[in-house]
Amino acid sequence: GTTVRRAIAYMEENLSWAIGLPDIAKALDVSVRSVQKAFHDDLGTTPMNYLRDRRLERVRAELADAVPSDGVTVTEVAERWGFGHLGNFSAIYRKRFGESPSETLRR
């Protein structure tokens, strides 16, 4: 629906920023509950899970394209895409992609 499309557009524009559900709802001028319901009904997920997955995909793409000899670090890339707690980040990354972020970087 329209709410999901608009929310996704807002998320994509702000992927590297520390946005939360209240920010998304405010940008769309709808309630937090409306955003949650729209994502549940249309995509079967929560807005924040969707946002986290998009950020994880960006991290993975950046790590896969990076050359370790360029000095790129997992920490730098994770933080750039809004992941502050690296232990938690590594765990959700591994769960999502079946390898650690450093394994992606080394390939």
Image: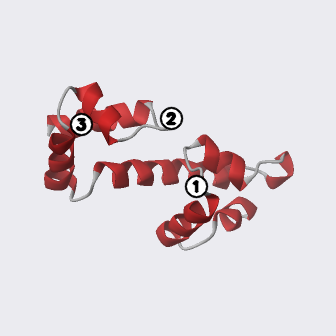
Relative placement, left or right, of 33 versus 63 is left
Relative placement, left or right, of 23 versus 82 is left
**Residue 42, x across and y down, in percent:** 16, 51
Q: How far apart are labels 1 and 3 at the CA level?
A: 24 Å
The residue tagged 3 is 5
Disc with the residue nearer the chain's start (3 vs 2): 3
Q: Nearer the viewer, mark 3 or mark 2?
A: 2
- Binning the other alpha carbons within 10 Å of mark 2 as few (below 14), some (14 to 19) or many (20 upward) gives few
Q: How far apart are labels 2 and 1 at the CA level?
A: 17 Å
Give the camera-side residue of 64 and 8: 8
- Residue in the picture at 86% in, 51% down: 69
Q: Secondary structure at mark 3?
A: helix
Labelled disc at residue 33: none
Tell me which amino acid carries mark 1: Arg
Taking the view exactly as shown, the residue that stands out farthest to the right is 69
- Residue in the picture at 42% in, 37% down: 19
Q: Nearer the viewer, mark 2 or mark 1?
A: 2
Task: Give the color scheme: rainbow, by chain, secondary structure or one colour.
Answer: secondary structure
Disc with the residue nearer the chain's start (1 vs 3): 3
Taking 30 as reference, is 77 above or below it? below
- Residue in the picture at 43% in, 30% down: 13
Q: How far apart are labels 3 and 2 at the CA level?
A: 19 Å
The residue tagged 1 is 60
Of the 4 image quadrants, the one containing the C terminus is bottom right
- Residue in the picture at 70% in, 55% down: 74
Labelled disc at residue 17: 2
Taking 2 as reference, is 75 above or below it? below
Taking 1 as reference, is 13 above or below it? above
Relative placement, left or right, of 99 versus 105 is left
Q: Secondary structure at mark 2?
A: loop
Tell me which amino acid carries mark 2: Trp
